Image: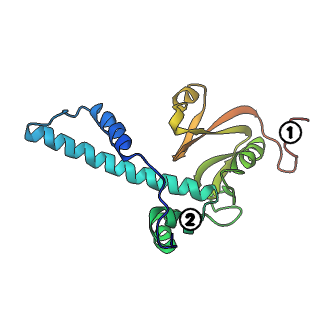
Amino acid sequence: MTEAEPVRPEIDADRTAQVLAEAIGRLDVAAEPRTAEEHLRLVAVAAAVEAQSRALLAEAVASSRAAGVTWAALGGRLGMSKQAVQKRFASRAEPSGDELDDGSRVLGPVTAFTEMGELAIAGRHGWHSVEFGPLFHRVVRSPTQWEHARVSMLRGRVRSLTGEGWVVIGSAFPYTYLKRDLGTPALAEDDPPLTADR
């Protein structure tokens, strides 16, 4: 295989089409459209699916970047040049500077492998995430400690967690990020965070 050839995963196109058809069938679309209105409903649902698919791809790329995947590797998988994939998907630049004008801070660079540990430490000091992107979280400080969670969108746990006091920060496929105010006083900035053995 040459470098120009994209590396495509083996995906069962028939199975993908079947799953998609079953999902669309749950959206009040006629199984066999006969009227102009039924066809227009199918067109509207197909357009919504396309928009969601584009958003899903953008979130998957952002998540891959946060996990340390290079632009070159993403370009190879998508059949695009490194520059083309970067131009298309690098719309959210990483904020720069320790403390921003609004008093928030940038926690980063972090990856999918390090971000939860960094958020745990920051949370003990009262910092909680309000925004994130590839390789960063923007955090703000409060007088109380915070807990952060990252759950797979594919497991459907978000709804049960929000019922337990968790607040959704946002999603980047395949994850949803949440936070919860623990109600205990935050550690001072110069205090080391508590660990399991302290």
Q: Is residue 90 visible?
A: no
Mark positioned earlier in the residue sequence (1 or 2): 2
Task: Please give the name of the residue rendered at 37% of the width and 40% of the height, measured from the top-left corner.
Answer: 15
Give the number of the disc on residue 73: 2
Element under label 1? loop
Residue sitting farthest toward the left: 35
Give the number of the disc on residue 195: 1
Observer-nearest residue: 1 or 8?
1
Contact? badges 1 and 2 (CB < 8 Å)? no
Mark closer to the observer (1, 2): 2
Position of the C terminus by quadrant: top right
Horizontal side of residue 98 vs 198, given as left or right: left
Observer-nearest residue: 161 or 36?
36
Observer-nearest residue: 108 or 165?
108
Q: Position of residue 147 (x, y in %)?
A: 70, 37
Give the number of the disc on residue 149: none
Task: Please give the name of the residue rendered at 36% of the width and 37% of the height, measured from the top-left corner.
Answer: 19
Among the 4 quarters of the image, the one containing residue 20: top left
| Image vertical order of residue 93 relative to residue 187, above or below | below
Residue sitting farthest toward the right: 198
Element under label 2? helix
Amino acid type at mark 2: Ala
| Image vertical order of residue 37 relative to residue 118, above or below | above
